[in-house]
């Protein structure tokens, strides 16, 4: 399983800014290894975020996203103490979910 995501969620007024750093190699399928063979594509294809269990954001990514991607978004109606969850699924079927508390 992949390394944990680093999630920070900070409330300001009636919204929260969420910052997520995901650990993933994100291979595009176009790079060659030292022997000249193509490295197979392997990338995060689906990302979703929840606030207290309710889906607030979904995204579909492709091979053009960089290694160890950073994602930032704002959630309206979030307040300190709420739980923000982020999960992803990659092109090999692996997945990761992590959670943070809004501060």
Image: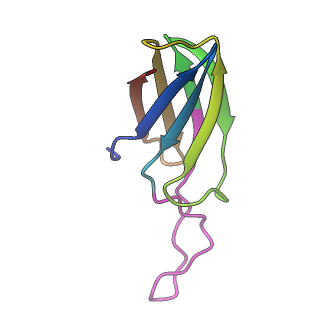
In this rendered view, identify the residue nearer to me: 60 or 5.
Answer: 5
Name the main secondary structure of what is drawn in magenta.
loop
Among all residues in the image, which is located at the extreme bottom? 35
Residue 81 in percent (x, y) is at 42, 12
Residue 15 in percent (x, y) is at 63, 18
In this rendered view, identify the residue nearer to me: 16 or 70.
Answer: 16
What colouring does the structure picture have?
Answer: rainbow
Is 82 placed above or below 7 here? above
Residue 99 in percent (x, y) is at 40, 25
At a point 32% along the width and 44% down the height, the residue shown is: 1
Is 24 placed above or below 77 here? below
> Is residue 37 within the magenta segment?
yes
In this rendered view, identify the residue nearer to me: 44 or 91.
Answer: 44
Residue 94 in percent (x, y) is at 43, 42
Is 81 placed above or below 1 here? above
At a point 35% along the width and 46% down the height, the residue shown is: 2
Quarter of the figure with the C terminus: top left
Residues drawn in magenta: 25-47
Quadrant position of residue 49: top right
């Amino acid at each position: 399983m992949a390394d944990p995501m680093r999630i920070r969620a900070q409330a300001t007024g009636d919204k929260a800014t969420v910052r997520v750093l995901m650990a993933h190699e994100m291979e595009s399928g176009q790079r060659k290894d030292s022997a000249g063979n193509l490295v197979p594509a392997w990338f995060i294809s689906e990302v979703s975020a929840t606030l207290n269990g309710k889906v607030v954001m979904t995204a579909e990514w492709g091979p053009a996203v960089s290694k160890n991607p950073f994602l930032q978004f704002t959630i309206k109606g979030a307040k300190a103490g709420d739980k923000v969850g982020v999960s992803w699924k990659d092109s090999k079927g692996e997945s990761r979910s992590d959670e943070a508390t809004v501060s």
